[in-house]
Amino acid sequence: MTRAVCPGSFDPVTNGHLDIFRRAAGIFDELVVATGTNPSKSRLFDPAARLEMLREVCADLPNVTVMGFSGLIVDFCREIDAQAIVKGLRGGNDYEFELPMAQMNSHLTGVETVFIPTNAALGYISSSLVKEVASLGGDVSALVPPSVLSRLQAELARSATAG
Ligand code: PNS
C-alpha cells in the first residue's frame, strides 16, 4: 500500500490545495494531509481551526485523512509509515523553494517528494493572497471552499475587533 503525506500550513486551505489533494488521492492508496507550522509565516488560524477546516473540505475524499504534526516532516512520515511527500507546484518560485527541502528530506531519511503541477486555472491562489484580499474587502469566494469562506470572514472580523 502506498501512503503519502501532503504537508502545509493551510492557513487557510484553498481551492488550489484541494485540487492537489484530489489529484494526489488518485495516485496514492492513502493520502494524509498534515498541518504543520512554518515559523517564518504569521498565522491567522490556530492549529485546531486549520485542522477542522481541512477535515470539512476533505470529508468527501474517502482515502484522505487529516492530521496535525510538529517537528520534522520526515519524522512524521516515518511515524505513520508514509513513503512519499506530495507538494503542489505553482511555478518557478515554488520550485526554487521546494527543491532544497525535497533534497534535504531525501537526505535525512530517504523519503521522496512528488511534485504535482497546479491546475493552470488555480495557480495564482495562495493562502497569503486570499487573506490579504479578504482582509481588504475583496471577493475570495471563488478561491476557497464555502465553509472556509465563512470561517475566514468570521476570523477577520474577530481579529479586526481585537485590534
Ligand atoms: O504551507 P507551507 O507554509 O509551505 O508549509 C511548510 C511546512 C509546514 C510544510 C514546512 O515548513 C515543513 O515541512 N515544516 C516541518 C519542519 C521541517 O521538516 N523542516 C525541514 C524541511 S526540509
Image (cartoon, rainbow, N blue to C red):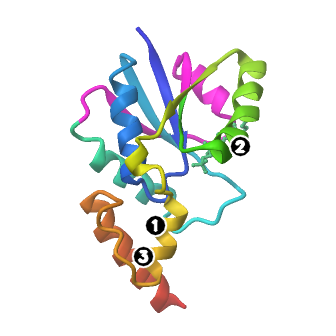
C-alpha distance separating marks 1 and 3 = 6 Å
Residue 84 coordinates in the image, percent (x, y): 55, 20
Provide the residue designation for mark 3.
Answer: 134
Is residue 27 visible from the viewing direction of this image?
A: yes
Is residue 68 visible from the viewing direction of this image?
A: no
Rendered view: 142 above or below 8: below
Going from N to C along the chain, the mark reached first, 2 or 1, is 2
| Mark 2 CB within 8 Å of ligand 1 | yes
Residue 84 lies in magenta, yes or no? Answer: yes
Name the residue at 50% across, 89% down.
Answer: 162
Q: Amino acid at mark 1?
A: Val
Image quadrant containing the C terminus: bottom right
View quadrant of ligand 1: top right
Provide the residue designation for mark 1.
Answer: 130
Residue density around tag 2, few if under 14, some if 14–19, many if 20 or more, within 10 Å: few
Mark 1 and mark 3 residues within 8 Å of each other at the beta carbon: yes
C-alpha distance separating marks 2 and 1 = 20 Å
C-alpha distance separating marks 2 and 3 = 26 Å
What range of the chain is rendered magenta? 61-85
